Amino acid sequence: MIKEYLLTIFLGTILGFGITGGYYALHQNKNKQNTTDISPTPTITEIQMSTQVSITPSVSETKSIINITSPENSTVLSTAKTSIKGDAKPNSLIIISTPSQTFSGETNSNGVFSVNIELDSGVNLIKISSIDSDDNQDETELTLTYSTAKI
Amino acid sequence: MSFLFFLFSIFFQPVLAQETTATPTVSQNLTEEVREMVTQKVKEIQQNNSGNTSISTDIPKSLVGTITQLGDNQITINYKNENKNINITDDTIFINEKKVKIKFSGLKSGQVILAMGYYDQSGNFSAKRIITTTTDDIENKNEIVFGTVADISQTSNILVLIPVKNKNTQYQIKTDSKTKITDKNQNILTFSKLKSGQKVVIVIQPDAKISNTFDASQIITFESSSTSPTPTPKK
């Protein structure tokens, strides 16, 4: 009788553990599904499928605006020759137009560019355009002043 | 006893299988990483759009615009519908268009000026040098247009361009001996190398007399000059 009683308790314990374990496994599966659902872009789903965690390419693809990093807008320069540095979409054509001259260059595979230009004396309203491989044109302006006067 | 082992293995199988995959942790980390990167990117774009980047106080800066108000020690200028204040100090030098020194009282409302000086930590601009100038001197009349060559004149150096940004418009573009024509690699080309259907970037200035007509200072082609026309399949 005692033997049967102990066996029942043992079986009950195992059954309890089993139900708890089953519920835990089910809950984990649900969480996994939810995580997949909230992934915002197909790129992320692709990353989840592979074991490599690399999201840089998708970020570079979102770049669409030409951005000038140097010189700062409205800067007064004491030399006529300077470099316009910035970034746009990778492998884009960059056209820089000062009031009297036009200069061109290209962005590298990281979208970075540096184009040497020559300023006119005084205020230079510079127009900068980028044209990417998908025929998208972005434009921005930069004002630089060339003056040899001591400021 | 074997029955017990059987029951045990059945009940614990899903839990063990779940532990071995460990995918949820990786995906959660990924989601967090992506969220961080997106947040960072949004911040960058917002900074660029608002123009609230920090102003350097040790680099000389310039402001241009039309005088709208003259105070005792301050000038307000307007440029592209934006007002800016310029502080005047005892050290500020005033120069007219003939490069002659003038007094502060020589400035008038409506004059176009170029002010050179420095920003302080609070973002106030103090001028060291103020030069009177003209609207023409602060403008850049060039336009950079990207489009497709629709037609090329056989008798004169004129082409018709359809801009990518406005395909309902046609620009008549005149070229002359001063127009620089190159390919993307900056190889010099002649006007005769231009072809209909070719994609080009043209730096133009509007013709004051004829509407939708422009003078080209530079043309950059997107295709190599050595490319042969597309062959027509023969039957």
Image: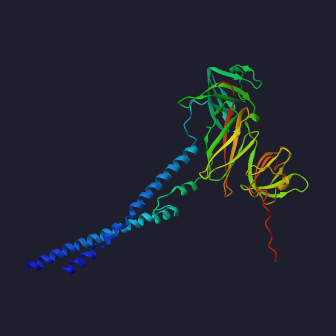
Q: Nearer the viewer, residue B210 or A59?
A: A59
Quarter that holds the C terminus of chain B: bottom right
- Give the residue furthest to the right: B155
Q: Is residue B204 left or right of residue A85?
A: right
Q: Quadrant of residue B234?
A: bottom right
Q: Vertically, is B66 above or below A58?
A: above
- Please tell me whether residue B58 is drawn above or below residue B80 in the rendered image: above
Q: How many marks?
A: 0
Horizontal placement of B5 versus B75: left or right? left
> Residue B204: x and y, percent?
78, 46
Identified at 59% across, 51% down, the residue is: A110
Where does the image place residue A61, in percent across and percent down from the top left? 58, 56
Q: Nearer the viewer, residue B198 or B99?
A: B198
Horizontal and vertical percent for residue B31? Answer: 44, 58
Q: Quadrant of residue A17?
A: bottom left
B217 up-or-down from B133: above or below? below
The quarter in which the N terminus of chain B is drawn is bottom left
Of residues B135 and A144, the one nearer the viewer is A144
Which residue occupies 83% across, 58% down? B151
Please tell me which residue is depicted at 26% across the width and 75% down the height of the picture.
B9
Colour setting: rainbow
Task: Please provide percent x and percent y for residue A84.
Answer: 65, 41
